[in-house]
Amino acid sequence: MADITRSIEPFELNQGFGENPANYARFGLKGHNGWDLKTKFPDTPQGFRNILSSWASKFYAQGNEGNDGFGLYFEVIVQLYNTYKLTYAHCKSIESFENKNEGDTMAISDNTGNSTGSHLHLTIKRGQLQNGKFVSDNYNNGYFGAINPQEFFDELRKYKKEKGTTSAPEGCLVPNTPEWRTKYEQVVSSATKWADTLKILEIADDTNTTPSDRIKSVVGGYKSRETDLSNKLNEKSIEVSKATQEITNRVEQVGRLEKDVLEKDKYYKALIDALNKQLKNGSDALPLAQTRIGVLEGQLDEANKAKGRALNDAQEARSQLDACQKGTLVPTPQLIFSLVIQYFGNKLHKGGDKV
């Protein structure tokens, strides 16, 4: 029996780390950024093979890139002497889980995404969890932080020999699980002392088993982030209130604009009617009247065009006003004026109701 469990057993590589650099240059990589493990065996001729947990693994994330990239994939966090993120790509299906122990089945391999045949692609990155997010070490190493998986399995072999347990080290806080969210909410809302935090997280304050400095830093980061988000929310609420007041202040101004447009419309029409009457009373005034009518008709046409543009602008801004009223959009000064014009443009369109 092998001393460690690899992701696919039996273990056989189709493509190693860093191989075929020419094929991966278009992706900005120096070469293949992981291992491709064989999945087609006599008992799995289509490549539908169990993907196994190599050590105590905590679910981190999953996604589906369709026919591109990794296809259906998922990621786990494994804590050894260092913190690792393992990405398993081209899957057929993924189990719903929070934690898996060594040898447990996590998913089924396949040929999804950008793949030339059934296999399991394994990418491994070494890094840290910062505020619940994994951050890779040496991201600019030519593989976007990915390392040769052999480094992980070498450390796993040593760790397993010295520690002799498959349970995850305490203090490995991994996001995106109900358990993690519950603990986090308790910590940020009620824990004011380190002893309280340890009790909530069910962690022993023992430097031999718990990376206490890291946990203190992470929890402190959570609390700081929660405070920052709360402050930003308050700032946005104030901005929305100011914008709402500005809209109210512009209502009267736009009301006067609406009235002016309507009065000009009536004025030009009255002048045209008066000149038409003069034409009926004397032919001597005909040339002058015709000239005057042409000028007035042109001015009336411009007024109607201006009104039409205002109505179009109002209709276009309607969706922005709705978003602002629902609190999903913070209006800028330009947006405020557009929303106000829209509001009264609708009233013009409906028949010139007064404000």
Image (cartoon, rainbow, N blue to C red):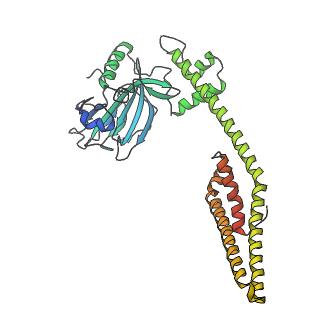
Give the number of callouts.
0
Q: How far from the left and from the top, in percent, is residue 42?
A: 20, 39
Q: Can residue 156 be seen in this view?
A: yes
Residue farthest left in this picture: 42
Q: State which quarter of the image contains the N terminus.
A: top left
Q: Nearer the viewer, residue 203 or 74?
A: 74
Q: Write the residue at 34% across / 37% down.
A: 89
Q: Nearer the viewer, residue 6 or 338?
A: 338
Determine the residue positioned at 77% across, 64% down.
Answer: 259
Residue 232 sits above or below residue 298 on the image:
above
Q: Which quadrant of the figure has residue 105? A: top left
Percent of width and height locating residue 91:
34, 40
Q: Is residue 150 left or right of residue 273?
A: left
Q: In which quarter of the image is the C terminus?
A: bottom right
- Which residue is located at x 38 percent, y 39 percent? 73
Pinpoint residue 248: horizontal percent, then vertical percent: 76, 51
Quadrant hosting residue 29: top left
Q: Which residue is painted at 69% across and 81% down in the image?
A: 290
**Image: 307 above or below 137:** below
- Residue 341, horizontal then vertical, whole percent: 69, 57
Task: Using residue 270 as the reference point, say whether residue 160 is left or right of it.
Answer: left
> Left or right: 180 with respect to 32?
right
Q: In the orientation shown, which residue stands out farthest toward the front?
A: 284
Instruction: Residue 326: tell me if it is visible.
Output: no
Viewer-nearest residue: 51 or 176: 176
